[in-house]
Image: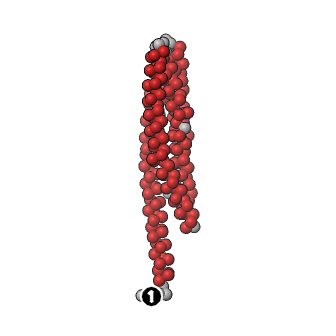
Amino acid sequence: MDFEHLGETWRNRSADVSSDSTSLLISRIRQRALELETIVKRRDRIETWSALIVFPVFTWVSVVGRFTVSRIGSGILAAACLFIPIWLLLARRPAPDPSLPLCTALAMERARVEGQVRLLKNVVWWYLLPLGLGVVLFLAGPWSSPWQLTAIILSVGALYGWIYRLNMRAVRLELLPRLQELDQAIASFQNET
């Protein structure tokens, strides 16, 4: 056994293991970034097309509807149908270019994930509240009974509570672990340099 070169051999071996684990981490982050991009694009496409399809209907009802309350609800829903795609577009960021320096690409990917976390954590204000209020007013117009109105409010509240929980679950189980993984990659990259 050559004890003189043992230290050097150990350092080279640990550097190889470190670079291997870093490259594995980077490839995993790139793969997960592509997965997230696919999911976000699909969600945004579905939401945008849905909004654009129902926008003319709610606009028409808000102009020619028979009940004032339903017309107000339709107007709120039509406005929400315009603003939801805008919110989705503002939260989306381009994928980092693979030719960028690694630290810059990691920081850009972190900003992309953070934007989606912010979007989903604020889903009540830009999505659920406008749509919920619009739906309740739209459906409340033809029915004036307090019991029917209560049933509408409870039904919409239950549905939107479920949607809220799905969004928070996605943040907790998908996006926050991605942020932690990116933070670890950035920290390990900074430690190596």
**Does the rendering let one see residue 57?**
no
Q: Residues within 10 Å of mark 1 (few under 14, many from 20)?
A: few
**Does the rendering let one see residue 31?**
yes
Q: Is residue 43 above or below residue 112?
A: above
Q: Is residue 149 above or below residue 159?
A: above
Closer to the camera, 92 or 184? 184
Q: Which residue appears at 51% of the width and 23% of the height? A: 134
Quarter of the rendering occupied by the N terminus: bottom left
The amino acid at mark 1 is: Asp
Quarter of the rendering occupied by the C terminus: bottom right
Residue 167 point in image, percent of width and height: 47, 39
Q: Which residue appears at 53% of the width and 40% of the height? A: 121
* SS under mark 1: loop
Q: Is residue 66 above or below residue 5?
A: above
Q: Which residue appears at 45% of the width and 34% of the height? A: 163
Q: Which residue appears at 48% of the width and 47% of the height? A: 175
Protein image colouring: secondary structure
Residue 45 point in image, percent of width and height: 45, 37
Residue 97 point in image, percent of width and height: 51, 54
Residue 168 point in image, percent of width and height: 48, 41
Q: What residue is pinned by disc 1? A: 2
Closer to the camera, 106 or 57? 106
